[in-house]
């Protein structure tokens, strides 16, 4: 047992008196009491939660009555409440406030949780009962959602080794524990190396070309680091604009090399050996479960259904977009030679800089020109109002909900009939210990209990936008508005969930379907009617001038070919690592460069690559599934064409999207849900048309 001498729930409560996880949350909407939770509470609560669920599982497995949906599947679905509560907090903290103490704790916590999960899914008595229900139940007596839950639970046991021999089950345990440790170490190394780097500038002449607000942010970063001058980091709000606008080529190169060699510098944070161990362990795991490759194992439970469909999509995209990408890059190179001389060789650290110059030349616009109209508070107002316009929902700030950091804002979300829908936590700014990028997460899933009470979800929206200064509000680029809309789309998926069983709630759907609700929201980014509801100059209050907005729309497909090929390349790298059929024993960066050589648009630089820092596929849920972004882009373009046919703000189409996609979670297969909304299977042509790409690709 986890706790020596603990034999019942009373003893658990005695040992854990005062632990906020072990009592009902006495907060508004049962929100997580972040103000009372300490790091020291997490591990004891996990251990207690494990023991509680062990008791719940034992009761199911030892039930002498014949196995039924009601006495086996439903109680299994409801088990582990404490573990879910603690895991929600631990996962959140790992993303937004990681440090050495939490990292050390997480290693033990995730090891315990992995062992506990294996104990459940490899429990022969429990699986025998679940299999008995799966094999013998009268499915006509079950609702559609119950049938889906039964199928998912049964398959989850099979995919977790329930049918393996005793010897192979032990090997499965060993591999899952190994992967848990390797992935945590990869994540720790990436975060620490990112946080450790600073480009420290003390000479103001080295700031030439940089936007004023970036210089101001760098000055604040220097003050926080107790340094004079300016500090630039590898976090996106600092890194990207520096490469776009700095006239100092040697500094652009320094920053680029620091970022592009993350995890590959031969130091304590080097991830290359971990990459090899991770992909080989995943291969071994897949082979153990009867699959030839890890990609085959993953895609068998995806909307794509098999690896061939993935390569078909990536191949068609490559065929269609590569000519445009080559034209775009050549045009940028030509401009660079016009400026620098005909012998100039453009390197990767030059690409964003000269891209911006070409964009300015062709469209008289750059990423900074819209910032004064896109203050974060106003953007958030516009995005929430868009949801009100489409779906009738409203957002109300609640400053009494406990938060994990002062930056976090919380909103109550209400339906058009004033029914409470969800809590939305918003965390917008970078800080030490917070991982880079943007994401949505669910800290409490939606479900309905036996009494019919609908327990509503709590979701988080996290970005890393530029912080406000003493004189200016936080302001976004149009790309950052796009990112915010993307993550907000994920949040709407969670907010609208309307299922009975938490395992099926939104956004816990098949991974290559999960990006549809997010990417469809990106279509509104440059719509004039949308922007005019919130995009006011922070000083004058003026709306975006029509000519400037026209320039934005004219430039919408700027580098569309390059951007697509870059995403295809990342998808191919992912598949290359997870479609191996024998253990990898080569050099990580050389292998990556070889994979992408045919799509290479810029010179490869020695000692750089994405794999050693590619957390999406090495530690996140996108392993063997990074293609999902392009798959979902195909879905969103096809789906949004229905909005365009009926008016992009059509409440009728929005309601259909809510009813058939957003609310249904994983209660039915996504192919069924999509057909119900769209009336047909998705077609790639809508994406090609939106991007201005000729339909020249064969159906590979």
Image (cartoon, rainbow, N blue to C red):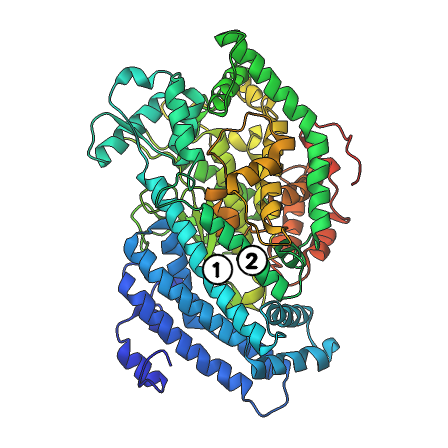
**At numbered mark 1, what does the secondary structure look like: helix, strand or loop?**
helix
Image x and y of residue 134, in percent:
68, 77
Locate residue 378 relative to residue 161 in the image: left or right. left
**Above or below for 552 versus 287:** above
Residue 545 visible in this rendered orientation of the protein: no
Single out the residue that lies furthest toward the front: 585
Locate the C terminus by quadrant.
top right
**Above or below for 538 versus 56:** above
In this rendered view, identify the residue nearer to me: 338 or 415. Answer: 338
In this rendered view, identify the residue nearer to me: 478 or 198. Answer: 198
| Residue 67 occupies quadrant | bottom right
State the residue position of label 1.
Answer: 179
Single out the residue that lies furthest toward the bottom: 64
- At a point 66% along the width and 68% down the height, the residue shown is 148
Crowd band around label 1 with a 10 angstrom C-alpha radius: few (<14), some (14–19), many (20+)? many
In this rendered view, identify the residue nearer to me: 641 or 387. Answer: 641
- At a point 56% along the width and 89% down the height, the residue shown is 63
**Above or below for 573 versus 278:** above
The span from disc 1 to disc 2 (Cα, nearest Å) is 8 Å
State the residue position of label 2.
Answer: 282
Crowd band around label 2 with a 10 angstrom C-alpha radius: few (<14), some (14–19), many (20+)? many
- At a point 64% along the width and 59% down the height, the residue shown is 297
């Amino acid at each position: 047992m986890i706790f020596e001498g603990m034999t019942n729930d009373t003893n658990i409560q005695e040992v854990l008196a005062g632990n906020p996880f072990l009592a009902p949350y006495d907060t508004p909407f049962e929100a997580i009491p972040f103000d009372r939770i300490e790091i020291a509470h997490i591990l004891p609560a996990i251990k207690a939660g494990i023991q509680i669920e062990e008791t719940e599982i034992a009761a199911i497995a030892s039930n002498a009555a014949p196995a039924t949906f009601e006495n086996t599947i439903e109680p299994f679905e409801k088990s582990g409440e404490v573990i879910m509560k603690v895991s929600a907090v631990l996962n959140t903290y790992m993303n937004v406030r990681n440090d050495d103490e939490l990292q050390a704790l997480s290693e033990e916590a995730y090891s315990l949780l992995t062992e506990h999960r294996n104990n459940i899914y490899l429990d022969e008595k429990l699986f025998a009962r679940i299999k008995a229900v799966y094999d013998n139940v009268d499915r006509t007596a079950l609702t559609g959602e119950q049938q889906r839950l039964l199928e998912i639970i049964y398959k989850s046991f099979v995919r977790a080794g329930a049918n393996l021999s005793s010897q192979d089950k032990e090997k499965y345990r060993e591999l899952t524990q190994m992967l848990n440790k390797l992935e945590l170490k990869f994540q720790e190394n990436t975060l620490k190396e990112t946080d450790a780097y600073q480009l420290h500038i003390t000479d103001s002449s080295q700031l030439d070309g940089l936007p004023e607000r970036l210089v101001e942010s760098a000055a604040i970063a220097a003050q926080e680091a107790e340094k004079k001058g300016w500090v630039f980091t590898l976090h996106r709000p600092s890194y990207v604009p520096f490469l776009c606008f700095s006239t100092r080529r040697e500094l652009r190169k320094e920053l680029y090399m620091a970022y592009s060699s993350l995890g590959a510098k031969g130091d304590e944070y080097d991830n290359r050996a971990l990459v090899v161990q991770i992909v080989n362990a995943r291969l071994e795991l897949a082979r153990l479960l009867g699959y030839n490759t890890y990609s085959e194992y993953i895609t068998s439970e995806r909307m794509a259904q098999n690896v061939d469909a993935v390569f078909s999509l990536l191949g068609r995209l490559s065929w269609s977009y590569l000519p445009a990408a080559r034209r775009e890059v050549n045009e940028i190179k030509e401009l660079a030679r016009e400026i620098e001389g005909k012998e100039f060789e453009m390197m990767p650290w030059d690409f964003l800089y000269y891209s911006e110059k070409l964009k300015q030349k062709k469209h008289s616009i750059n990423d900074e020109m819209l910032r004064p109209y896109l203050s974060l508070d106003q953007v958030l107002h516009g995005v929430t109002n868009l949801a009100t316009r489409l779906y009738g929902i409203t957002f109300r700030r609640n400053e009494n909900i406990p938060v994990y950091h002062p930056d976090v804002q919380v909103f109550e979300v209400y339906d058009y009939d004033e029914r409470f829908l969800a809590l939305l936590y918003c965390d917008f700014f970078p800080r030490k210990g917070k991982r880079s990028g943007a994401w949505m997460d669910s800290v409490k899933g939606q479900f309905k209990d036996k009494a019919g009470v609908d327990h509503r979800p709590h979701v988080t929206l996290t970005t890393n936008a530029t912080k406000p200064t003493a004189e200016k509000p936080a302001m976004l680029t149009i790309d950052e508005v796009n990112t915010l809309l993307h993550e907000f789309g994920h949040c709407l998926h969670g907010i609208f969930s309307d299922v009975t069983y938490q395992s099926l709630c939104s956004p816990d759907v098949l991974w290559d379907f999960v990006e549809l609700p997010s990417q469809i929201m990106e279509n509104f980014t440059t719509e004039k009617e949308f922007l005019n509801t919130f995009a006011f100059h922070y000083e004058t209050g003026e709306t975006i001038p029509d000519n400037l907005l026209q320039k934005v729309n004219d430039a919408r497909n700027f580098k569309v070919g390059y951007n697509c090929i870059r995403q295809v390349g990342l998808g191919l790298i992912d598949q290359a690592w997870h479609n191996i059929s024998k253990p990898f024993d080569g050099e990580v960066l050389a292998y990556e460069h070889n994979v992408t050589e045919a799509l290479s648009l810029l010179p490869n630089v020695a000692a750089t690559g994405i794999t050693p820092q590619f957390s999406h596929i090495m530690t996140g849920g996108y392993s063997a599934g990074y293609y999902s972004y392009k798959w979902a882009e195909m879905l969103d373009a096809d789906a949004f064409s229905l909005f365009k046919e009926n008016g992009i703000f059509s409440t009728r189409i929005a309601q259909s999207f809510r009813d058939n996609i957003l609310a249904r979670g994983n209660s039915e297969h996504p192919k069924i849900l999509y057909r119900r909304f769209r009336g047909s299977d998705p077609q790639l042509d809508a994406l090609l048309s939106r991007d201005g790409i000729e339909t020249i690709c064969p159906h590979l």
